[in-house]
Image: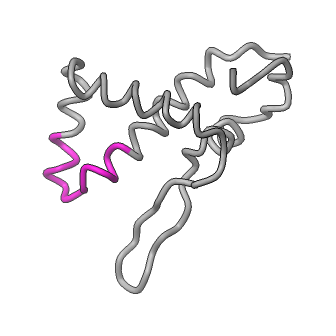
Amino acid sequence: MTAGDNPERLRSEPAWAHLCGVSPLQASSGKVTRHRLNRGGDRQANRALWTIVISRLASDPETQAYMERRVKEGRSKREIIRMLKRYVAREVYRHLPRG
């Protein structure tokens, strides 16, 4: 639904991520380097990506291992979900029809 009848307007994966609201934005201050998600974009698409990530965390061993590895690196659950949403957006973009 988010790509609509005109998927060729999405020229790149970053453009798709921006449209879904999962493109990273700098949120660094001082010595801390971090990112946050873009608050713009299609909220329904963002919610769909969130649902996919939460489902994978509950059932996919590979995603669970990723979560554990990132927690050991010192990342917060919120940051990990942000990274997973971007990863899922990348996967979805590969399956969009090209114009």
Residue 80 on the magenta span: yes
**Which quadrant would residue 83 be assigned to in this image?**
top left
Residue located 40% across and 71% down the image: 33
Residue 47 position within the rendered picture, expressed as x and y whole percent measured from the top left? 49, 34
The answer to whether residue 40 is above or below residue 56 is: below
Q: Does the magenta stretch mainly form a helix, a strand or a loop?
A: helix
Residue located 47% across and 59% down the image: 36
* Placement of the N terminus among the 4 image quadrants: top right
Residue 49 position within the rendered picture, expressed as x and y whole percent measured from the top left? 47, 30
Side of 7 relative to 43 (left or right): right
Residue 59 on the magenta span: no
Q: Nearer the viewer, residue 76 or 98?
A: 76
**Which quadrant would residue 41 be assigned to in this image?**
top right
Side of 33 relative to 86 (left or right): left
The answer to whether residue 23 is above or below residue 54 is: below
Span of residues in magenta: 68-81
Residue located 44% across and 37% down the image: 85
